Image (spheres, rainbow, N blue to C red):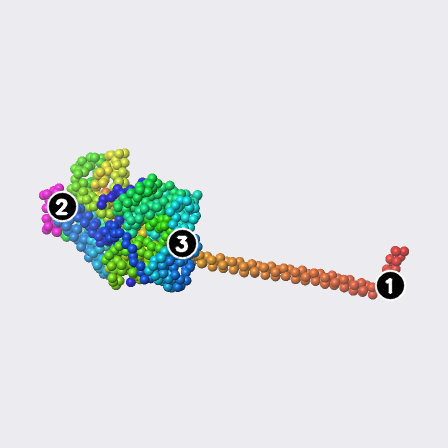
Amino acid sequence: MIFLSSPHMHGGNNIQLTMFSVIIALIPAAMVSVFLYGWLAVFILTTCIGVSLATEYFVLKWQGKDTQRVWDGSAGLTGLLLALVLPAAVPWWMAVFAAVFAIVLGKQLYGGLGHNPFNPALAARVVLLISFPVQMTSWIVPMHMDASLDMYSFTTSLKFFFLGPDAVQQTWDAITMASPLGYLKTELGQGVTVTEALVNYHYSTLHAFIGREAGSLGEGSALALLMGGIWLMARHTISWHIPISYLLTMAVLAGLFNLINPDVYAPPMFHLLAGGLILCAFFMATDPVSSPSSGIGKIVFGIGCGVLTWVIRTFGNYPEGAMFAVVLMNMATPLIDYYVRPRVYGHKRGKQS
Amino acid sequence: MFDLWEKIKQTLPMGTSAGFTGGVVHSNQHKRTAGQAIIACPLPELLIHPVKQHIGDPCEPMVEVGERVLKGQMIAKAQGYISVPVHASTSGTVEKIEEHTIPHPSGLGLTSIFIKPDGLDEVDESLHPLPNYRSVDAAELRERIRNAGIAGLGGAVFPTFVKLVKDQKNPIETVILNGIECEPWLTCDHQLMLEKAHEIISGMDIILHLVGAEKGIIAIEDNKPDAVEMMQKTLQEMGLNEHVQVQVLPTRYPQGGEKQLIQALTGKEVPAGQLPMHIGVLSTNVGTSKAIYDAVCLGEPLTERVITVSGDAAAKPSNMLVRLGTSMHFLLEQCGVSSFEDIKVMHGGPMMGELLSQDDVPVVKGSNGILAMQKRSIMRAHFDEEPCIRCGDCGDVCPAGLMPNLLASHCKENQFERAEDYNLFDCIECGACSYVCPAHIPLVHYFRYGKGQVAQIQREKAFAEESRIRSEKRDARLAKELAEKEEKRRIAREKKEARAKALAEKEAAEKAVVDKDSAEQASAEQTDKPEVKADDKPAEDKA
């Protein structure tokens, strides 16, 4: 028998369990997306997950690795996360491209599971946003807002998904609307105050919380995301450090500037509930592979994400900054892991060895 | 389940009122032998005493083959300071003294004394009981504890007498008695506290007396409420409850680690590179305390100890009082292990213990548990390694505050300088990181490998340094010799030159003289007469 080193006991956790826990935690958010966008959401979800799994399988096979790895849950999770950050207006080929990009260029090119510097789903989302800004910032009117709109039946959705708006005799303007963040950005540019813009948009904090505003598939309902996120924190699948430091930084920054000039800077509650912030804070920034591994490093990472998100949203050209912030902080992860380390027992903080 | 606040408190520097950094919680389901009375193990047919059962220098056998020995007779004497002697654990004859496998994963051997018991169990009475130890000189007590062969019975087996010093510079304020027993499966300390509470506390009193400490703490985890109650009751009966208190700690592994226990109880950390005595703390295991009592008050050296014999392949797991030197094979047979085909024998607990390559090895002072495990349950803990997903769970549970995932990858890539920079040598090898790793990475294995390699590199470096110095010395010597030669040559040359010069001058002078002479001669020849005239002149002058 080969030499085995202690410990000779294991707690029973494994990668598959971790990945599937996150998938389960995302189910409420996925359900909300189906509730908001009907069959469109179903098509995008199945396309992204299916293509991710298939790509993962072919890449593993091509590399001569064990193809059973495809079921470790990581590729499925990437597909699911990717679908949840796409707007309902994306055509099929964009979803396929994004999924292939996420798996091949976002993950496998770097050596597969555990080696990707960026969150694969977010990397793919960023590439899509930069390459196809129109489709990626056109938000389909959610189902409950305009019941007269014939967009959500199975056949219309299928046609729209594969053939575009012309096939369903619709124009972009008729079926899309601005998201709260995008609307605010445009109005602020025209000299309208924050309060007026939000009133004009018929913005409601409650609606933003339970998920009735337009946006990407999964980022609509803060409630559904929080349910999943808090469950993950309770199971210790994700640690509290990143979500809490991220959201707190965001709230403090937004609150501070809102106090200074409420006409130009949106209130903290608006920032917290708008866009993909909660999705990013609980499910994207917490991606273990691309975030720092120590608790204190995770706090630094979360603070960095919070600052960058607020800065991009407020001063940048894009209305939403959460995913750029996370991808940028992903790049800083090796540095954080090197410079920000937990204090070692019996040593003073900051002094190495 | 939802201990978010606890987690937050652990990460933030908010004072460590209780608890230690990191750690994992094991369920109690493996403590199969909890509450089982200690039973005495029968006398085996052969007892094997390795000459080194402690940390430090090995002992020197002091008996001859064929000699009759008594129970408690010293059979190997300590060598050097950090060393304690070995005693025979029954009466009998020394059968042979030769190398035998010791309980170590390497399967290496060590000189051992084999004793064939005669069944009489005759006791060596030379060490007389000393019940009123307070009247005895501290140095004599320490010597007695040393001669009784007592080393830390918690598993580290560090010679206990070394710690029992009254040092003016580092006065011991708190004595901690470690009754934590945080390894799953093990229950021997628990049972000892239930059955030998009086002896354990008396032993602690001896330690308090020896080091002049005022305060004593008996630390017990909250999964042993009966032991807590028993210790409290006994303290009250003995009237010691003013100085000594029982502290109940929440069950968490590795709380029984010395550094972790000190942190959990006092909030203080043992500074890197220092010992607990430097912060005024001394900690011993409850078993060691009982052994001190036996040695001082009863005059009995350390010849037996309580061991948990258990494991999922043992039909009759039990807490046993075992003579040191008993074969583990024999011991497991007593506990219902009939076939050794599909089992692995583990020495110690499952978290830090070692798997033995064979089972006919003797019980030693550091054996606190012997577990017979099904091969398949061992293999279940050693899945194939998957890629690290950097989840950081290992860092969350690390009691030393390390970043095990980065450390392991540096060790794996042979980047030992990086690994040392990440405090490789602060790892206590508790195994909590490997236990929680979702990718089943044998992190502790990589740390051991890294430590071994660094030690090897340091040895090589030292050797290279030595060679460098030697070669530099040689170069210096050669240069010196050369310089000396050169100097000699120079001097010789100078001398030669001087001589040559002198010679030349002399020759020149001679030549000059000769020239002069010849010239004079010539002139004399030419002016013979005037010379005569000249000769006449002085005469004239004189006149």
> Amino acid under label 1?
Lys
At 31% across and 52% down in the image, what residue appears?
Answer: B430
Mark closer to the observer (3, 2): 3
Mark closer to the observer (3, 1): 3
> Would you say the magenta stretch is mainly helix, strand or loop?
loop
Picture disc at residue B126: 3
Q: Magenta region: which residues? A: A141-160
**Regarding mark 1 in the picture, which secondary structure is present there?**
helix
Residue A343 appears at what percent x and percent y? 34, 46
Does residue B209 appear in this view? yes
**Regarding mark 3 in the picture, which secondary structure is present there?**
loop
**Whole-number angstrom distance, CA of label 3 to CA of label 2:** 88 Å
Chain at tag 1: B
Pick whichever, B27 or B193, lies toward us: B193
Picture disc at residue A35: 2
- Verify CB contact (< 8 Å) between mark 3 and mark 1: no
> Amino acid under label 2?
Phe
Does residue A124 show up magenta in the picture?
no
Q: Where is mark 1, residue-wise?
A: B529
* Quadrant location, the C terminus of chain B: bottom right
Q: Are marks 3 and 2 on the same chain?
A: no
- Toward which corner of the image does residue B375 lie, by quadrant? bottom left
Residue B405 appears at what percent x and percent y? 31, 52
Classify residue B277 as left or right of residue B533.
left
